[in-house]
Image (cartoon, rainbow, N blue to C red):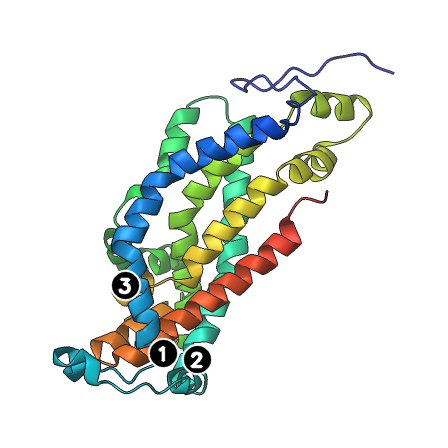
Amino acid sequence: MSTTQHAPSPGATDRTGGGGAAAPTGRGRLRQGRAAWVLALPFCLLFLTFTMWPVIQSLFMSFTDTRARDLRHPFAVDVIGLDNYVKALTDPTFLHAARNTAYFVVVGVPLTLAVALAAAVALDRGISRLRAVFRLGFYMPVITSIVAVAVVWRFLLQGEYGLINTVLGWFGIQGPNWLGDPHWSMPALILMASWRNFGTAMIIFLAGLQAVPWSLHEAAAIDGAGAWQRFRHITLPLLRPTLLFVSVTTAIGYLQFFEEPFVMTSGGPLNSTISLSMYTYKQFGFGNYGYAASMSYLIFVIIAVVTALQFRLLRENT
């Protein structure tokens, strides 16, 4: 058997340690719990002071027939129970927006995570020069205004004179009317959203990759494991907590996607890009406050269910 040692990638942090830190004792866990509460206390105080009461009020509003005209007499509204929720669940536009949102999440989240993980692996192992420049370039869309990004992409995706269709034309391909065709409008928004958001996931994946002990890769390489085998059987299992965090946060953001259709398509064409958040926003604009509040809580329930499913599927096996 060859004893040649595989050197770690340039710029990689020290990952040769095979053992982890000892599990904290009962007293250590108590100290950690106290420290966590001290750090969380400012947020808890701000939440209780400025957010808790509006949340309770909006929940009560969802069980009433509150409209814009009732703001002058808020105690004159009628309590109608679950009527708003039943109305939302039987509203064709709300159901269509739910399907659009599901499409956006089911396609957009895996695409974003795949691109982010590929970029993180390249920065961690493959790219040795100008690594900081690539990190900054990949992360720049995240810190750029979503409105500015959406306006630029709207010009890129124009049907006749857009840059994307112009480039496709150089190869004899006639590009579609990306934002004017109901079949292509949602894929166009998913493409733009994935490009804009993969930078955050990439940074988190990169931190997770640098926590994987390099000694495990060396041992597997000595035993004859290829790069894909090492990635599949070493990197991915150890990256599972990171993957869970990134998947949950990305899905929560995509379930609430609003700016992309609002700026680029206004929910069209033919409501093909209207989302749950956008339809809720429109109902608030129409003055249907009780109805819109019920929709917002339905979105909350959907997010909670999706998050619970992700925890069940991606949590670590004890």
Residue located beneath label 3 in the image: 54
Q: Earlier in the sequence, mark 3 or mark 1?
A: 3
Residue 111 appears in view: yes
Q: CA distance from mark 3 to mark 1?
A: 31 Å
Q: Is residue 141 among the parts visible in the rendering?
A: no
Q: Is residue 74 left or right of residue 296?
A: left
Local crowd size for mark 2, using a 10 Å CA cut-off: few (<14), some (14–19), many (≥20): some
Q: Which mark is residue 96?
A: 2
Residue picked out by circle 1: 271
Identified by mark 2, the residue type is His
Circle 3 crowding by C-alpha within 10 Å: few under 14, some 14–19, many from 20: few
Residue found at x 66% / y 17%:
17
Q: In the image, what residue type sits under mark 1?
A: Asn
Assess whether mark 1 and mark 3 are in contact (beta carbons under 8 angstroms).
no
- Viewer-nearest residue: 47 or 143: 47
Asked if residue 212 lies left or right of residue 188, the reply is: right
User: Residue 82 versus residue 256: which sits nearer the camera?
Assistant: 82
Disc 2 is placed on an element classified as: helix
Q: CA distance from mark 2 to mark 3?
A: 29 Å
Mark closer to the chain start, 2 or 3 = 3
